[in-house]
Image (cartoon, rainbow, N blue to C red):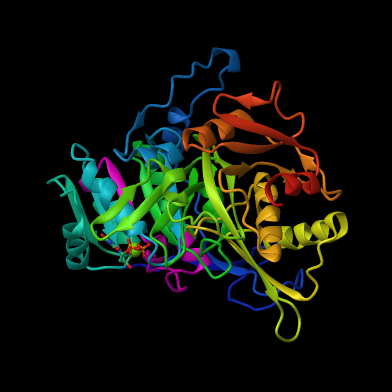
C-alpha cells in the first residue's frame, strides 16, 4: 500500500511541521500537533470539469421548497423521541457513553427491530461471536438483513461499502477505526477525525444514515477531538449510574430536532426496556414518612418527570464538614445551603450534607431547588415533609421562590400520580387555589414553604 504524505499541524495556530513536536514554536502551546494528510495535488482537468458539472447553482432562498425531512422510525419510541422523530436519511449520529452503559445493546436492538432495512454493523471492539452472543440474549431476534463485519481498517471498509450498499450503518466504535497510512495509533485525534470524515462523506453522498458509537473520557467528553462532535449531525449521550438499571439517552446536539428530549430505558437481562411511566417508576421506592425526602417535578424536554430528592444532614464527626451531591449540581447545593443559612437561619456549619436524586438520575433543572431545600431542612430537623406534596420552584439568592416554566404540565403530572398538595411559586399561575382534588399552594419565600410542609 502506498504511504500517503502526512504533516503535523498545530491545532491552535495552524503552524506546520513534518514531525510531531510537543511545543509549537510559533504560538508556544503544548501538545497541539495533530497529524494530517497532505494532499496538495490539483484535480486533473477532466476531474475539474466533472466537479463543475455537478456543482449546483445558487438559488434564491424564497424558491427553496422544504419537504419535511423523511424519517424512519427506529421502532423504539424512546429512541425516536431523542432523535427528534426518527432517523433522518444521510444523517450521522454519534452515541457516547461510559463503557458498559449499553451503547452496543441499544444499537443491536435497533438493528434487530429494523427488519426491512439492510443494516451493516461494523464492529471493531468485539468479535462477531461476541455480537452473536449478545443478540441471543435480546428479546427481539434479528432478521437476515442484519450484516456483521469485524473490521477496523478504513481502507477495507471504504472498499466494502461501495460494494455492500447497506441502508444503515452502525460503527462500534469510532475510536477503533483507523487508516493504516497514518502513523498515529487508532483512537488518536487524527485517526478518529479521518474515520468520522469517511463515514460523513459516505452518509452524505448516499443518503445512508450512520450511527457512530463513541467512548467517553474521564472528563465526560467523547474521546477524540471535539471536532468529531462538530462534524456529525447529532450527538447523543447514554448515561446512568453503573449500579442502577436506569439509562437515560440525551441529545446534546441535534441538527434535526430539539436537544431537550430524553429517552428513559431500564437494562434487563434480555436487553434495554423502555420506561413509559418514568414518574411512577422513579417514585416507586419512596418511603413516605421518612425525613429528608421530597418530591419534585422536573421537566425533561416536553415531558414532566416526578423525582424523589433526598438529603442526609448529620453532625460532622471530624474535620471539615462534607458536602456531597449525587445527581445534583454541587455548586447549586452550596448555594442552597448558603441561602438557607442566611434567609432561614439554618446552621449547617458543623454538619455533613449529602444530597441525592433517587434512581440514579441527574437532575439539573432549577425548579427542583425548592424540593431539595425542603428535604435538607427536613433531614436536619428530622421531621418528614408532608408526604402528599410536590414542591416546584427555583430558589433565588434572596430566598425568594422564582417562577418556572411549563408549570401546568408539572401540575398535571403530579395530579395524575395522585398527589394532594403542590407548592408553586407565587404568581406563576393565573387562578390558583383548589384545582379539582389538588390544593395549589402559592409560596413567595423558602421560609413560607417550610411553614407549609414541615411543622
Ligand atoms: P454494552 O451494550 O456492551 O455496553 P457498551 O457498548 O456501552 O460498552 O452493555 C454492557 C452491559 O450491559 C454489560 O455489563 C452487560 C449488560 N447487559 C445486560 O444487563 N442485559 C443485556 O441484555 C445485555 C445485552 C447487556
Ligand atoms: Mg460496546
Viewed as shown, does residue 38 lie left or right of 244?
right
Q: Image height check: is 23 above or below 151?
A: below
Q: Position of residue 240 (x, y in %)?
A: 46, 59
- In which quadrant of the rendered image does the N terminus lie? bottom left
Identify the residue at image location x=49%, y=53%: 41
**Which of the two residues, 332 or 320, is positioned nearer the viewer here?**
320
**Which of the two residues, 59 or 107, is positioned nearer the viewer here?**
107
Can residue 158 be seen here? The reply is no
The answer to whether residue 388 is magenta is no
The answer to whether residue 174 is magenta is yes
Please give the range of residues in magenta: 163-192
Quadrant position of residue 285: bottom left
Find the residue positioned furthest to the bottom: 318
Find the residue positioned furthest to the left: 144
Identify the residue at image location x=52%, y=68%: 217
Q: Position of residue 384 (x, y in %)?
A: 62, 56
**Which of the two residues, 323 or 123, is positioned nearer the viewer here?**
323
Quadrant position of residue 275: top left
Q: Quadrant of ligand 1?
A: bottom left
Amino acid at each position: 500500500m502506498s504511504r500517503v504524505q502526512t504533516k503535523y499541524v498545530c491545532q491552535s495556530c495552524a503552524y506546520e511541521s513534518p514531525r510531531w513536536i510537543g511545543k509549537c514554536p510559533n504560538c508556544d502551546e503544548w501538545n497541539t500537533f495533530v497529524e494530517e494528510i497532505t494532499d496538495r495535488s490539483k484535480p486533473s482537468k477532466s476531474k475539474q470539469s466533472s466537479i463543475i458539472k455537478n456543482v449546483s447553482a445558487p438559488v434564491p432562498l424564497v424558491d427553496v421548497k422544504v419537504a419535511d425531512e423523511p424519517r424512519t422510525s427506529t421502532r423504539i419510541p424512546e429512541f425516536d423521541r431523542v432523535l427528534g422523530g426518527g432517523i433522518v436519511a444521510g444523517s450521522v449520529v454519534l452515541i457516547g457513553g461510559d463503557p458498559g452503559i449499553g451503547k452496543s445493546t441499544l444499537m443491536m436492538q435497533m438493528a434487530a427491530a429494523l427488519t426491512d432495512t439492510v443494516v451493516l454493523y461494523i464492529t471493531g471492539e468485539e468479535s462477531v461471536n461476541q455480537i452473536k452472543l449478545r443478540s441471543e440474549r435480546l428479546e427481539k431476534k434479528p432478521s437476515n438483513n442484519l450484516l456483521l463485519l469485524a473490521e477496523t481498517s478504513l481502507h477495507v471498509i471504504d472498499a466494502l461499502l461501495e460494494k455492500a450498499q447497506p441502508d444503515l450503518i452502525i460503527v462500534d466504535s469510532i475510536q477503533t477505526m483507523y487508516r493504516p497510512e497514518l502513523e498515529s495509533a487508532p483512537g488518536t485525534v487524527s485517526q478518529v477525525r479521518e474515520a468520522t470524515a469517511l463515514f460523513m462523506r459516505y452518509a452524505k453522498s448516499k443518503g445512508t444514515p450512520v450511527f457512530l458509537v463513541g467512548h467517553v473520557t474521564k472528563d465526560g467528553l467523547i474521546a477524540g477531538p471535539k471536532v468529531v462532535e462538530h462534524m456529525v449531525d447529532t450527538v447523543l449521550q447514554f448515561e446512568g449510574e453503573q449500579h442502577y438499571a436506569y439509562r437515560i439517552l440525551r441529545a446534546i446536539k441535534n441538527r434535526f430536532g430539539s436537544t431537550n428530549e430524553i429517552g428513559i430505558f431500564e437494562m434487563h437481562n434480555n436487553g434495554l426496556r423502555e420506561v413509559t411511566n418514568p414518574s411512577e417508576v422513579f417514585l416507586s421506592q419512596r418511603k413516605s414518612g421518612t425525613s429528608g425526602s421530597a418530591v419534585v417535578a422536573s421537566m425533561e424536554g416536553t415531558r414532566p418527570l416526578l423525582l424523589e430528592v433526598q438529603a442526609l444532614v448529620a453532625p460532622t464527626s471530624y474535620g471539615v464538614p462534607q458536602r456531597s451531591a449525587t445527581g445534583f449540581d454541587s455548586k447549586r447545593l452550596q448555594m442552597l445551603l448558603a441561602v438557607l443559612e442566611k434567609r432561614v437561619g439554618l446552621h449547617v456549619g458543623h454538619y455533613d450534607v449529602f444530597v441525592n436524586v433517587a434512581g440514579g438520575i441527574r437532575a439539573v433543572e432549577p425548579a427542583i431547588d425548592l424540593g431539595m431545600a425542603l428535604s435538607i431542612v427536613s433531614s436536619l430537623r428530622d421531621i418528614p415533609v408532608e408526604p402528599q406534596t410536590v414542591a416546584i420552584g427555583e430558589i433565588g439568592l434572596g430566598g425568594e421562590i422564582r417562577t418556572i416554566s411549563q408549570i401546568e404540565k408539572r401540575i398535571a403530572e403530579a395530579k395524575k400520580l395522585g398527589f394532594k398538595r403542590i407548592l408553586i411559586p407565587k404568581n406563576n399561575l393565573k387562578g390558583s387555589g383548589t384545582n379539582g382534588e389538588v390544593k395549589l399552594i402559592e409560596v413567595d419565600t423558602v421560609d413560607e414553604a417550610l411553614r407549609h410542609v414541615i411543622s
